[in-house]
Amino acid sequence: VTRVALLGGTGRIGPALALRLSAAGVEVVLGSREAEKADATATRLSERLAGVQSAPITGQTNADAVRDAGVVMVTVPFEAQAATLTPLAGALEELIVVSTAIPMRFDPDLGPEAVDVAEGSAAEQVAAVLPRSRVVGALHTVSSVHLGKLDRDLDEDTVVTSDDAGARAEVMELLELIPGLRAVDGGRLVNARATEGMTVLLLSINRMVKRSVGIRITNLPRA
Ligand SMILES: NC(=O)c1ccc[n+]([C@@H]2O[C@H](COP(=O)([O-])OP(=O)(O)OC[C@H]3O[C@@H](n4cnc5c(N)ncnc54)[C@H](OP(=O)(O)O)[C@@H]3O)[C@@H](O)[C@H]2O)c1
């Protein structure tokens, strides 16, 4: 994969991922509802990468960003996921589309809570909206805080799920370009229910320990 589009790449996880992918030599196009916002974010990130060997980061509208992308990652809040993807369904046919969304809300007193999704998970919702795309779930448990610190390697796993084994393998290979991030094959897309739900648990732990925790799957055979 040489070019990744990040839809809604102007928030928290989008820019952090863009920095890591760019530093790994992968060209990134940030998508946004507003081209100017994407462009401004791309300029800010490119300035941060000055002096670091990196591939270009540019910004466009979401619709323009998906053109010529090898992989499309959806980094908008769950509530915005279906509305963002529906008008792009034709352009996203045959493409690998990665869902990162966690269907949840923050109760001001009780903290993070999962919300029910009719399709079962956010990733399965993407598959329902984009029946002709190669849908993958990944990155749920990876915090933008750690991703954004380019001077520190990650030290965690991400479980990658898809009903398309080829797409799953491609996304695993892409994510393992990020130093210290290990991609674990999580099997079918339905298993995104567990990775998304696990993230609500991690966010509850974060709230108690006041830092961003991640996951490790133990006792895997060596690659
Ligand atoms: N933050 C994390 O550490 C983390 C970790 C793992 C997974 N995730 C998941 O990644 C996704 C993005 O997280 P985030 O923290 O980066 O979110 P965010 O900063 O709240 O939003 C990301 C971008 O989504 C777009 N957006 C927001 N509301 C929208 C709407 N109503 N319609 C269309 N686009 C909208 C915005 O882009 P424009 O205004 O430029 O269009 C915004 O910059 C979420 O689904 C989250 O569950 C986050």
Image (cartoon, helix red, strand yellow):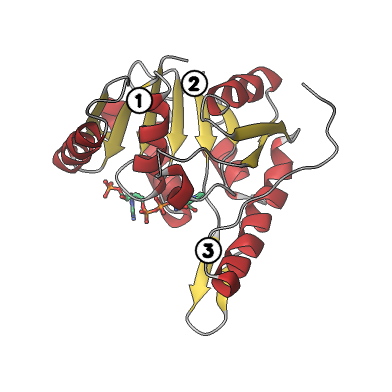
Residue occupying the point 85% across, 27% down: 221
Q: Residue 122 versus residue 22: which sits nearer the camera?
A: 22
The residue identified by callout 3 is 211
Residues packed near mark 3 inside 10 Å, few (<14), some (14 to 19) or many (20 plus): few
Q: Earlier in the sequence, mark 2 or mark 3?
A: 2
On screen, residue 212 versus residue 30, left or right, reads: right
Up/down of 95 relative to 98, above or below: above
Instruction: Check whether the beta carbons of the residues at disc 2 and disc 1 lie within 8 A of each other.
Output: yes
Q: Earlier in the sequence, mark 2 or mark 1?
A: 1
Identify which amino acid the numbered label 1 is placed on: Val
Q: Quadrant of the C terminus?
A: top right
Q: Quadrant of residue 24?
A: top left
Residues packed near mark 1 inside 10 Å, few (<14), some (14 to 19) or many (20 plus): many
Identify which amino acid the numbered label 3 is placed on: Arg
- State how far apart marks 2 and 1 are (Cα): 9 Å
Q: Quadrant of residue 70?
A: top left
Asked if the beta carbon under badge 3 is closer than 8 A to the nearest atom of ligand 1, the reply is: no
- State how far apart marks 3 and 1 are (Cα): 34 Å
On screen, residue 52 versus residue 105, left or right, reads: left
Residue occupying the point 45% across, 49% down: 144
Asked if the beta carbon under badge 2 is closer than 8 A to the nearest atom of ligand 1, the reply is: no
The residue identified by callout 1 is 66
Secondary structure beneath label 2: loop
For marks 2 and 3, give the one nearer the viewer: 3
On screen, residue 25 versus residue 118, left or right, reads: left
| Coordinates of residue 4 in the picture (x, y in percent) | 40, 24
The residue identified by callout 2 is 95
| Coordinates of residue 75 in the picture (x, y in percent) | 42, 43
| Coordinates of residue 7 in the picture (x, y in percent) | 36, 37
Q: Earlier in the sequence, mark 3 or mark 1?
A: 1
Identify which amino acid the numbered label 2 is placed on: Leu
Up/down of 116 relative to 220, above or below: below
